Amino acid sequence: WEKQESGEGAVGVGEDVSLDCMCRDHAESNDLWVTRQGYLIPDSQLVSDARTGCRETTLMRSKPAMFDAAGLVCEQHFATSLDGTKVPYFTMRRQDIAMDGGNPTLLDAYGGFEIAML
């Protein structure tokens, strides 16, 4: 794997993209459904063409945005458990906020081992 620079339209941290065929016969159509969702973007369904490598998409429908995500960032970090396991977690914050420990924080988490919420 080779890390590539993110450009416009790239899948951001905390986002999920899935692809599904619209037609099973490639001679008839190479269109794909592209479903995109994430912490900072509303769920969206787009259409793209597999022949072009999905370089261009057309928005078909989207849920309404429930908040203004302008100026917010989503970042992935890792905590190390006592046994050395790297545990991923995400933070969402204003991009311009000082990371000095002096800001109010809302923590929501889930766990395993039959402990559903923190």
Image (spheres, rainbow, N blue to C red):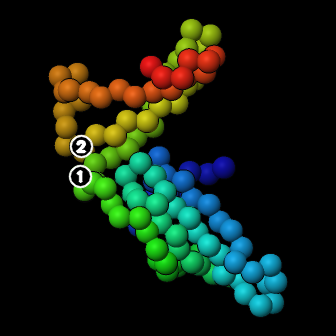
Q: Identify whether 64 is placed above or below 81.
A: below
Task: Look at label 2 and name its amino acid.
Answer: Arg
Q: Identify whether 70 is placed above or below 93.
A: below
Nearer to me, 53 or 18:
18
Q: Identify whether 114 is placed above or below 50.
A: above
- Who's the residue at 46% across and 60% down the image? 43
Residue 9: which quarter of the image?
Answer: bottom left
Residue 66: which quarter of the image?
Answer: bottom left
Report helix, strand or loop for mark 2: strand
Q: Find residue 38 and report its horizontal and vertical position in percent.
A: 46, 52
- How dense is the environment of label 1, judged by Cα within 10 Å: few (below 14), some, or many (20 and up)? few
Report helix, strand or loop for mark 1: loop
- Who's the residue at 43% across and 36% down the image? 90
- Who's the residue at 56% across and 64% down the image? 35
Q: Find residue 29 and report its horizontal and vertical position in percent.
A: 73, 87
On the question of residue 5 being in view, the answer is no
Residue 65 is left or right of residue 60, and the answer is left
Q: Give the residue pinned by disc 1.
A: 71
Task: Look at label 1 and name its amino acid.
Answer: Gly
Q: Find residue 39 and report its horizontal and vertical position in percent.
A: 41, 48
Residue 34 is left or right of residue 67, and the answer is right
Name the mark on residue 52.
none
Name the mark on residue 94.
2
- Who's the residue at 28% across and 48% down the image? 72
Total numbered circles: 2
- How dense is the environment of label 2, judged by Cα within 10 Å: few (below 14), some, or many (20 and up)? few
> How many angstroms separate mark 1 from mark 2 (CA)?
6 Å
